[in-house]
Each structure stands twice: as C-alpha cells, then as structure tokens.
Amino acid sequence: MNKQRKLFCLLCALMALTASAQCRYCLSYNDFVGNRWETVDSIDVVRASKGHKFLWGGGDFTIKGTDKASCKMLTSSAFAVIANNKLYVNCKGLKYKKIIFGKGFSRALSLGNRGLIFVGIDSKVAAAARYGAIAGGVAATQEDGRICYLISQGFDGERYIEVSPVGDEFMAKLLAEQTELLEKYYSETNPSERVHPNRIFSILKKSGYVEDLK
C-alpha cells in the first residue's frame, strides 16, 4: 500500500512537471523565431463565445494565468503561448491593411523560420462589421468568414504586426515541390472552401513544414 502511495505521488509530480513544461510564452515574433520562451506555472485556455469571436476580430480563445499579474502579462504582452502542446497567437497588435485585429488568442501552426499561420476573421467580414453592416447576411457568415493569415515579420516600426492572408498564391509557392499535395489543395473548386482554416491546417500538417513544439 505504501509503495502504491509513493508511486501515485511520483506520477502526480511527473504530471505536474509535464503540465508546467507545456505552458510557455514568448514576447515577440523574434523571440518566437529564435525559440526563446518563458515558462509559466499554469495557463487556462477558454473558448470564446461566438459573439466575442466576431467582435474581437477572430480571437477564438481567452488565455488566463493564475493571478491578475500573469493574466495581464499574457493578454497585453505575450506574442504567442504554448499550452498543452498547442500554439496560440495573441491577436492584439495584428493588422491586415486597414483592418486591425482585436482581443483574444487564435490557434496557430509554427512554420519555423517561415513564420506562423493563425486563424482570423476574413477582412471583408471585419470591414462590414466595422461599418455597421452586421445584420442579415454578414452576421450569418461570422463563423464561415474565417481564413488563415501568415505572420512572417515583427512590428512595423509603430505598434502593429502586418499579416497577410493565406490563399492560393501562398499555398502554390509553399507546395511547389509537392505536386500531389498541391493537386489535393486545388481539388476543392470552391474558393472559400479551399482556404477554410481546417483544410489549410490539414494540408500544412501533411506538408512537413509544420514544426513540432519543443
């Protein structure tokens, strides 16, 4: 019985150590590329409501620390977070042309030195919301109007990080030497369905370009 108790305590300690090691954050794009991460004791990842996703500009999740100080740091200063072997990027400070992304974190994939891919609201839907056209068709597309974006650089010298949509041009260039996978990408003839985040993520994971979170 004593041995079983000791074994149980050891397993609990190992699980706590593993969970702690899995919770990390970095403060900038350069830190991300340079694999410079800071550890944090615990992180709670909470899925945002549909309304918040839309208003926040595509942030699917809120990420909280164990106290007010860590919550504030993660929300205002963290560029990216790793929790439970999943990567999330902070949408704060991200911009595509005149569309500025809002609060929250979005799921992401690391492409190493090529940058990272994250999910955000389509700029067309965001622009419509910005000018008050939220009723009717636009509101109905708030879940469908989501695409992937690429972050391949840090701050633009001001306060924003410029991102670019992931679409046919990016995928054709990335998969230029993987003919079969590129053909699979183009096998979807509907342009909107072809660039849907779930599909982009699936194809990228098969490409070999997605890096493991170490």
Image: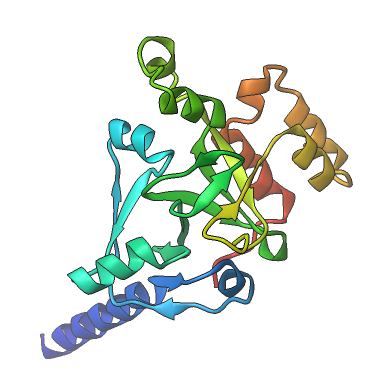
User: Where 152 sits versus 98, above or below?
Assistant: below
Q: Quadrant of the C terminus?
A: bottom right
Q: Position of residue 26 (x, y in %)?
A: 48, 72
Pick whichever, 207 or 35, lies toward us.
35
Horizontally, residue 63 falls left or right of residue 109, namely: left
Q: Residue at horizontal 23%, vertical 73%?
A: 69
Above or below: residue 190 compared with residue 201? above
Where's the N terminus, which quadrant?
Answer: bottom left
Residue, far front: 158
Q: Quadrant of residue 197?
A: top right
Residue at (43, 17) in percent of width and height: 138
- Left or right, 60 with respect to 213, comes to left
Residue at 57 percent across and 70 percent down: it is 32
Instruction: Classify residue 119 as left or right of residue 54.
Output: right
Count of marks overlaid on the render: 0
* Display colour scheme: rainbow
Q: Nearer the viewer, residue 40 or 208?
A: 40
Is 181 drawn above or below residue 22 in the view shown? above
Q: Quadrant of residue 54?
A: top left
Residue 64, percent from left and from top: 27, 61
Residue 97, how many percent across, how many down? 61, 40
Image height of 19 relative to 76, above or below: below
Percent coordinates x, y for residue 47 in the rendering: 30, 45
